[in-house]
Structures are given as structure tokens and as C-alpha cells.
Image (cartoon, rainbow, N blue to C red):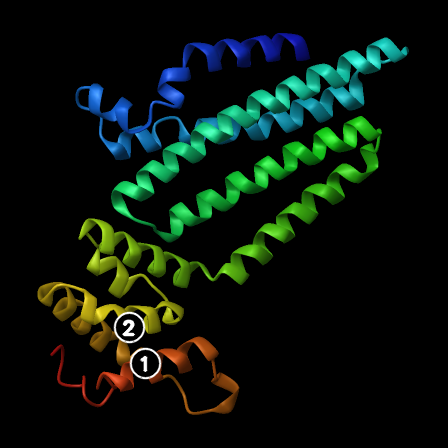
Amino acid sequence: MLAGIDALFALFVGVQFAVLFGGAHRVRVTAGLTYAQYARTGFIQLIIVAALAVVVILGAWDLGKRTSSQERRTFLRLTTVMVGLCGVILASALKRLMLYERAFGFTLMRFAATVVIGWIAFVLLAVLVTSRRGARDRVVAAILTGAVAALLVANIVNPDRYIAQHNLARYAGTGKIDVDYLGNAMSADAVPLIVASLDRLSRSDASRLRDELCLRAPWLAGSTDIRSWNAGRSAARAALRRIGITADSCRAGPS
């Protein structure tokens, strides 16, 4: 069974190699294909295939009979090949996602998709390592450890700040930025970066962004109760005050 699935994966990767790794060239030479369509087409399927591969490996590990050292070595070889091919599929999914981000910028959804890809890659490697060590009882712990590590890293990175930073850097290179997303979808953690970038934006973009920030000022004002204090909102309020935006000054509406 493992050999058959490996052969299927290898055939898929071989036939679809140009599609999987075509990148910007693939979009340019394919009539009617957009960056969004290329990035999204098959993305979920690629992730699901990689995730199901873990289930298949664990099922073969638990239910398969390996009575000789040769059979155990064969199982490990086939498992290694499957993990390697899944790695190629995940690399394709990540490449599509990065291409989409370069074309249209970062969003929380795209950031989350990147984290999920990293976690699935960790799980595949964990399954491979534990299978080689014969440590079946440690697989679940390794998977949960990977999930906790992914959440921890995501929180340390601070998604909103990371997204704002990269979208503003992309603006410096392309002159393109989604002002509505930057002004409405980002949390308080991104506000100090946004405020610091206003003088680098075009006059129209900076004006629209100031209006969006002004509309959010009352929400950022929050409560004066010490129990409601939040470091992100506090830094955001301080940044807004430096440019004259407060709940009182914006009460009459956008500037």
C-alpha cells in the first residue's frame, strides 16, 4: 500500500512539476490565469494530501506486520519516500502562497496558512524520526508539541505587526498598498508602525489612512480601569497622540 501511494505521489509530482513550481512564469504564459487563481488552485488539496499522508503512515505502522529486519527497513524506506514527496508538495504550496503575498501583500489568513504549512512539515518530520526510532508512543506528543510551538512562535512574531511591517516594506518597493486593510483589519499592535510610515506614503494614501486611524481612535481609547490595560493599545494610543489623533479630536469624524 505504501509503495502504491509513493508511486502515485511521484507520478503526480512528475506530471505536475511545471504547475507546482511554475511561479510567476506559469501565470504569465497561461491565458486567463491570475496570481490569485494560481495561489489558491489546489492549495487546500495539497495541504490535505500532506496531512492524510501522516494518517496513512501511522495506519501502516500500527496495522502492518513487519516480522523481519528486511520488512522493517522496507517500511522505513517507503515512509521516507512518502515524507520526501509530501515535502515537495508542501514546498509547492508555500511557493504559491509566497508568490501571492508578493503580488498582493500579507494578510492574517495568508500568515495563518504559512504557519499551518510549517506545522504540517514539522509533523511529517516528527513521524519520520519517531518511526526510525521505533517510538510510536511519542508521535502524539510530538504532534502536540509542534502545534504548541507553532502557536508560540506566531505569538512571539506578533502577526499584525509582522504583516504591517512587510506590507509597508512592499510599498517601498512597489508603491502599492492596501490602505483599507491596513487601516481596518490590523490590531492595535500594528498602529505604531502605521503611524511611523505616514510620511512615507503618498498624500492620498496617508490622508485615507489617517481617516481610518481617526475612526479607530475611540475604540483604542479603551477603559481607564487598570484591569483593562493592554500594552498594544497603550502603545497605539501614544503613537496616535504624537500625530494629534485622539478620541476627542476625532469625535467630529474623519479629518
- What residue is disc 2 on? 196
Q: Quadrant of the C terminus?
A: bottom left
Q: Residue at x 38, y 37 (%)?
A: 97
Q: CA distance from mark 1 to mark 2?
A: 8 Å
Q: Crowding near pointer 2: few (<14 within 10 Å), some, many (20+)?
A: few
Q: Amino acid at mark 1?
A: Ala
* 41 left or right, relative to 111: left
Considering the numbered disc 2 on the image, is that residue within a helix, a strand or a loop? helix
User: Mark number for residue 76?
Assistant: none
Q: Amino acid at mark 2?
A: Ala
- What residue is disc 1 on? 239
Q: Residue at x 27, y 85 (%)?
A: 242
Residue 129: give x, y in percent of width and height.
Answer: 75, 32
Tell me if residue 1 can be seen.
Answer: no
Contact flag, marks 1 and 2 (Cβ < 8 Å): yes
Q: Reading the chain from its start, which is encountered first: label 1 or label 2?
A: 2
Q: Residue at x 46, y 11 (%)?
A: 14
Residue 204, compared with residue 133, is above or below; it is below
Residue 125, compared with residue 252, is above or below; it is above
Residue 148, compared with residue 120, is above or below; it is below
Q: Select label 1 or label 2 by which is in front.
A: 2
* 202 left or right, relative to 92: left
* 115 left or right, relative to 172: right
* 167 left or right, relative to 145: left
Q: Which residue is farthest left?
A: 204
The image quadrant of residue 123 is: top right
